[in-house]
Image (tube, rainbow, N blue to C red):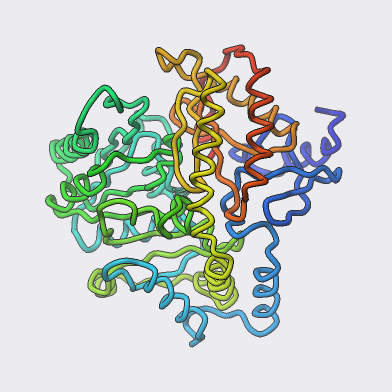
Amino acid sequence: MSDHPSADLIARRHRTLAPSYQLFYDEPVQLVRGEGVWVWDDGGRRYLDAYNNVPSVGHAHPRIVAAIAEQTALINTHTRYLHPAVIELAERLGELLPGELSSCYFVCSGTEANDLAVQIARTITGHDGVVVTERSYHGNSELVGRLSTDSYPAEERPDWLAVVEPPNIYRGPFRAGEHDDLGARYAALVGDGLDGLSERGHAPAAMLIDTSWDSNGVLVAPDGYVGTAADLVRARGGLVIADEVQAGYCRLGRHFWGHTRYDVVPDIVTLGKPMGAGHPVAAVITTPEIAAAFAERRNYFNTFGGNPVSARVALTVLDIVEDEGLLDHATRMGSEFDAGLSGLADRHEIIGNVQGSGMFWGLDLVADRSTREPIAYADAKRLVTSLRHDGVLTGVTGRFSNVLKLRPPLPFGREHLDHLIEVLDRRLAAFELHGGDDSRALGAEW
Ligand SMILES: Cc1ncc(COP(=O)(O)O)c(C=O)c1O
């Protein structure tokens, strides 16, 4: 790595950033500029970004740049002074959400949003149990870190946590083509998880669901699963929290939110990543009734959450999504992705399954199609690295870190997809499995 142009920066980074920080790629990329779905490194090389959802409306969108500059030049305070931007933002989010979901808290990260959501659920239910999936990721605080089963050893799981199988109908315990009633079968596992909680002396405060199941390999749940699981949790007095940090903002196509494609209206939703197109803004939204019950028992203030600059940026993201028709675009591109990736699967045995929707896809890569044995993490990493050398940014996810993750900025269009498919086609044709390390570091990629 010593002759890498960024060697000095990498060495300084190792000296100064805590070892918990990880870099993508053994030869890390130093990105210095972006525009739309393209980014450039410090040597002037251009990459197609097929991975990043945080710059949701495209890198360096001029309207986002202007919103930050204009509001910063006027005033930036906090929510204890009156400002119209944060109120307009709350109104617009409420209009986009179903049911009574209209009472907003603004925070700065997905972790903070989930932390507050679980605090609310615990406070108003009087229960402490939480249901999550195996290999979940919801954030990193003391509380939410425990809900991220992908980030720490299983033997350290607290008693109040119920960890259930995600609805993976390709490689989970119940599989498409082999079992019927898939939704009911996976929901029954949530019932088992709730039984386990109760045997350990806990009742559920909430089930936390990422409806893209990103860390599980980007899944689409079978019909009936989410609604039935939600009913089971509610029957025992718990609330349903939709973690929209990945799935929200048109990501899955057809709907603005991930949960709307399923048969459930959550009690609380949490937002993050795409909400500020790179600016740190996130939110928790619940019903007025739940918010009032929480306010009776707990104070809540967040210095940076909901400040006028963040609110203007978040409003501008909503405007861009509307003005540029990004929901319809994500829906249309979903069909294009499906066709393009399925075509690749016809040509390359290594693709065991194509899963996802809209602008969020996973290729479950297998060493053997008949056994569905996942390729080794080392091989998945080599593939992602080879794509980076071809100027395409992608990532890896899933329990076995064998799922190639494609999750580009929303303006990713047909011409970008054609380029991605062409590069993948070429690389997969020449790709040989070496095996090797199949245990990634905890939470290495998301
Ligand atoms: C589903 C989900 N929830 C929450 C988070 C945490 O968000 P943040 O990193 O902004 O704290 C993430 C981050 O990857 C996530 O994927």
Q: Is residue 4 left or right of residue 280?
A: right
> Which quadrant would the N terminus be assigned to in this image?
top right
Picture layout, residue 29 above or below residue 174: below
Residue at image location 49% in from the left, 59% down from the top: 327
Whole-percent x and y of residue 185? 20, 33
Picture layout, residue 100 above or below residue 147: below
Quadrant in which residue 90 is drawn = bottom left
Q: Is residue 268 left or right of residue 398?
A: left
Q: Is residue 243 left or right of residue 232?
A: right
Whole-percent x and y of residue 374? 47, 19
Whole-percent x and y of residue 134? 35, 34
Picture layout, residue 198 above or below residue 87: above
Whole-percent x and y of residue 6? 82, 39
Compare residues 10 and 263 and report the one nearer the observer. 263
Residue at image location 47% in from the left, 76% down from the top: 89
Residue at image location 84% in from the left, 28% down from the top: 2
Picture layout, residue 440 above or below residue 217: above
Compare residues 381 and 256 and report the one nearer the observer. 256
